[in-house]
Amino acid sequence: MLRFKSLGSGSSGNATLVEASGLVPFRLLIDCGLGLKHLSHRLGQAGLQPQDVHAVFITHEHGDHIGCARALALRYRIPVWMSRGTHAAIGSPDFDGLLHIARDGDAINLGGLQLMPFTVPHDAREPLQLSCTDGASKLGILTDLGHATAHVMAHLEACNALLLECNHDAEMLAQSTYPAFLKKRVGGPYGHLSNTAAAEIAHTVKNPGLRHVVAAHLSVQNNRPTLAQAMLAEALSCAEGDIVVAGPDNGCGWLQA
Ligand SMILES: [Zn+2]
Ligand SMILES: [Zn+2]
């Protein structure tokens, strides 16, 4: 069984646990955008300790994703995957042999999990998002991108679950107190997905095997959980209550992919 749980989502910090159960469960942490103390605390709330994480995948160098990745890796000897561009963007620090380079389209096989990283349009050096499968079901992780490309959509085909960025409501962003350059960046083709863009993606990904779509990376200032839920529910022809929202502080509960 493949299950996942957000430990927190949004510009204050992102971290998502993915677990492939087997005789020995394998746990992947996608992004570490929290301090080590906070991350340990949230793992503790899930009944886990940092040493229960077997591998870390970092999507890109923005602080809300990279956070304590190096400290976590070095302290607990956990291997870390990231793109060469992401590693360069953080100053190419030494990971004491724990760093592995992830590349668009190159599968990574880890303890019963297969990760497939893919390039997304976002204002980072070499950002990657990914899908994860245990051979039976497939989870798509898609945050931090300005728009959906054909390449992105091809990688999300036949997903059973999708953690999907719903960053902002376009109207709220336009009306917000953000300075003009920031509005342009967030709403631009290398920024973040609006609820409308996310709904279009959800509609395209929709298939009979799709069990969960989780709204993630919501802006506190420029979005509301109910707006994201309404947009996704309409796109998926489901009830608004069926759309789980991953919040900034508590993420969401375990969901089966
Ligand atoms: Zn982010
Ligand atoms: Zn980002």
Image (cartoon, helix red, strand yellow):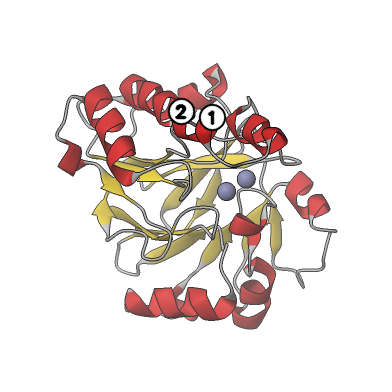
Does residue 51 lie above or below 131 as drawn? below
Name the spot of residue 91 as percent of width and height, x first: 85, 58
Are the residues flagged by discs 2 and 1 in contact, CB closer than 8 Å? yes
Q: Quadrant of the N terminus?
A: bottom left
State the CA–CA distance, disc 2 to disc 1.
Answer: 5 Å
* Residue type at tag 1: Ala
Nearer to us in this view, 159 or 121: 121
Determine which residue is flagged by label 2: 171
Name the residue located 27 percent from the left edge and 59 percent from the top edge.
254
The secondary element bearing badge 1 is classed as helix
Does residue 57 lie above or below 103 as drawn? below
Q: In which quarter of the image is ligand 2?
A: top right
Determine which residue is flagged by label 1: 174
The secondary element bearing badge 2 is classed as helix
Nearer to us in this view, 30 or 242: 242
Name the residue located 45 percent from the left edge and 55 percent from the top edge.
9
Name the spot of residue 244 as percent of width and height, x first: 26, 47
